[in-house]
């Protein structure tokens, strides 16, 4: 069984768990990193940004189809 979860808390990415073939992390500048998780020829990619003491994560590509399980299915409709 392969898992792919990007869980949010208060609208912000809090937990990421993805079974994958490869993980890549590249620092773009002092406060920004680009990360990607690859499974076969598909990827899920993130921008990770430091703003002072706060770190934010944004999913920019989701070809793997990660699940946001932070909201019950009946509330997503």
Image (cartoon, rainbow, N blue to C red):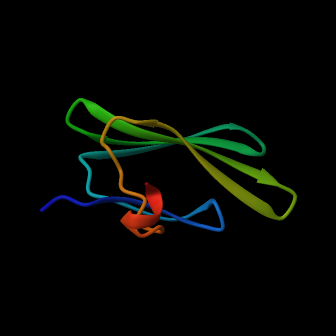
Write down the quadrant of residue 76 in the picture. bottom left
In this picture, is 4 found above or below 26?
Answer: below
User: x, y (%) of residue 29?
Assistant: 74, 37
Q: Residue at x 78, y 43 (%)?
A: 30
Residue at the spot x=87%, y=58% of the render? 52
Q: Quadrant of the N terminus?
A: bottom left
Front-most of 30 and 9? 9
Q: In the picture shown, does residue 9 fall above or below 46?
A: below
Answer with left or right where residue 13 lies relative to residue 37. Answer: right
Q: Position of residue 28 (x, y in %)?
A: 67, 34
Locate the C terminus and report the quarter of the image it occupies.
bottom left
**Residue at the extreme right of the image, as rendered:** 52
Q: Position of residue 7 (x, y in %)?
A: 48, 64
**Residue 26 occupies quadrant:** top right
- Please report the residue visible at 28 percent of the width from the left and 33 percent of the height from the top: 42
Q: Nearer the viewer, residue 32 or 72?
A: 72
| In this rendering, position of residue 38 left or right of residue 75 | left
């Amino acid at each position: 069984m392969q898992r792919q979860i990007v869980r949010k808390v208060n609208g912000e990415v809090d937990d990421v768990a993805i079974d994958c073939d490869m993980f890549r992390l590249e620092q773009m500048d002092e406060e920004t990193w680009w990360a990607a998780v690859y499974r076969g020829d598909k990827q899920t990619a993130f921008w990770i940004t430091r703003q002072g003491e706060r770190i934010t994560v944004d999913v920019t590509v989701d070809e793997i189809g990660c699940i946001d399980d932070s909201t019950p299915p009946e509330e997503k409709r």
